[in-house]
């Protein structure tokens, strides 16, 4: 059995496709273990969920309303549905997850809200294009813009500063829009900027944050954080109707306690960011390889020949050819090591020389 299990475990160093590939970090695992002792009330009516909500309020320094769901698709889709009616629209970047990777879930859960996507350099919204999308029509035949959605860190591994978030939020407010933030990798942005979570969320004008846990070292679970509590009215019913109310909620909420109280959420993010920066610096030195966007969080986007990419894959390396960029995306996680990065750089160097 031990030999079979060993054969089923892939080599650690070749996993750069996604931070979802990483396992559960010790702090999250231990918190789940503690929550697994004895009988506990179900559906979130338990001490672990109450404490996890309190932890999030402490971290964000405000009395926010918190809900836990299974994954990012549910978090984004239900949050947007709570902000919209069926005749509204959501404006986001053309590479945003809510446009490219949710299989129409935001439209489905909002009963038809339209997604309007715009471009912008390095994964960030072009605010002039945002304003054009908001103002180009105001007649009854056009889906009325209602929400501006930001991704932090972005799909291209860049990070919005507080000034950039505040500018986007001010534009949204001036036209009566709410601001939702897809924070699947929010921890990476906090670690990269060295600022408080509050400074790059509600203090900069964000109304609702979908705070990521799985990519940061948890098994499962995201938090939908309403900084404007009135926007959370009956959101618990949305969660139940969408199949997101976990009966054994403590196993989703308890890991947040372990991660936040220990500081592991930022330690994990800083570690992943540091190794991504190391990888980016190494790739820049390889002839035939070009970085496609600044490496500011835990993602590295590199352009290389099709032959080099094929050679890497045939050698067992896992990475994505990212949507809309044509380049290779390499993701670092809490579990990535310096040796992993050195192995990858050596493999890319060899592939580029072939």
Image (tube, rainbow, N blue to C red):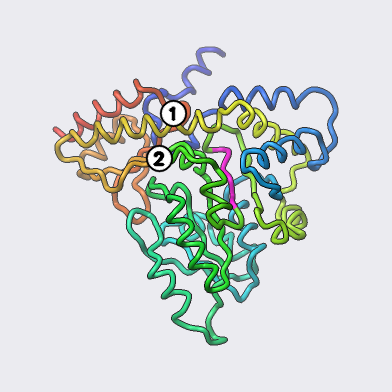
- Other-residue count near label 1 (Cα within 10 Å), few / some / many at <14 / 14–19 / ≥20: many
> Is 130 above or below relative to 198?
below
Which image quarter: residue 205? bottom right
Residue located 46% across and 58% down the image: 100
Residue span colored magenta: 209-214
The residue indicated by pointer 1 is 271
Nearest the viewer among 124 and 193 is 193
Mark 2 residue element: loop
Residue at the disc numbered 2: 297
Position in image of residue 336 (x %, y %): 42, 27
Q: Residues within 10 Å of mark 2 (few under 14, many from 20)?
A: many
Residue 352 placement: quadrant: top left
**Which numbered tag is attached to residue 240?**
none
Residue found at x 30% / y 28%: 344
Q: Residue 312 falls in which quadrant of the image?
A: top left
Residue 13 point in image, percent of width and height: 38, 25
Q: In the depicted view, which residue is nearer to us: 176 or 302?
A: 176
Asked whether, in this view, residue 95 is left or right of residue 20, the answer is left
Cα separation, mark 1 vs mark 2, equals: 10 Å
Query: For this view, does 294 lie left or right of residue 198?
Result: left
* Residue 225 position in % (x across, y down): 65, 49
**Residue nearest the observer in this picture, 346 or 27:** 27
Q: Residue furthest top?
A: 2
Where does the N terminus fall, quadrant-wise? top right
């Amino acid at each position: 059995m031990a030999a079979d299990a060993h054969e089923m475990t892939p080599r650690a160093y070749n996993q750069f496709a996604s931070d979802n590939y990483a396992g559960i970090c010790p702090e999250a695992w231990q918190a789940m273990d503690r929550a697994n002792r004895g009988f506990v009330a179900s559906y979130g009516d338990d001490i672990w969920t109450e404490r996890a909500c309190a932890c999030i309020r402490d971290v964000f320094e405000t009395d926010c309303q918190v809900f836990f769901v299974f994954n990012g698709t549910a978090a984004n889709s239900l949050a947007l549905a709570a902000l919209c009616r069926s005749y509204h629209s959501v404006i986001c970047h053309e590479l945003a997850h809510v446009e490219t990777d949710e299989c129409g879930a935001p439209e489905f859960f909002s009963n038809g809200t339209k997604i309007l996507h715009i471009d912008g350099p390095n994964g960030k919204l072009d605010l002039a294009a945002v304003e054009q999308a908001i103002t180009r029509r105001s007649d009854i035949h056009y889906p009325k813009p209602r929400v501006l959605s930001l991704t932090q860190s972005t799909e291209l591994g860049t990070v919005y500063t507080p000034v950039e978030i505040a500018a986007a939020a001010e534009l949204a407010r001036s036209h009566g829009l709410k601001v939702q933030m897809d924070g699947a990798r929010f921890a990476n942005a906090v670690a990269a900027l060295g600022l408080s979570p509050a400074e790059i969320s509600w203090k900069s004008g964000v109304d609702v944050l979908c705070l990521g846990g799985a990519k940061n070292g948890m098994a499962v679970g995201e938090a939908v954080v309403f900084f404007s509590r009135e926007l959370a009215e009956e959101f618990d019913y949305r969660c139940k109707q969408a199949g997101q109310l976990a009966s054994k909620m403590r196993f989703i909420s308890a890991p947040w306690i372990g991660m936040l109280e220990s500081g592991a959420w930022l330690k994990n993010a800083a570690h992943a960011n540091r190794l991504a920066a190391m990888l980016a610096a190494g790739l820049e030195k390889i002839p035939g390889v070009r970085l496609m966007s600044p490496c500011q969080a835990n993602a590295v986007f590199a352009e290389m020949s099709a032959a080099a990419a094929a050679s890497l894959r045939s050698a067992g390396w896992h990475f994505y050819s990212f949507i809309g960029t044509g380049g290779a995306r390499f993701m670092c996680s809490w579990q990535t090591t310096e040796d992993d990065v050195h192995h990858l750089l050596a493999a890319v160097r060899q592939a580029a020389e072939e």
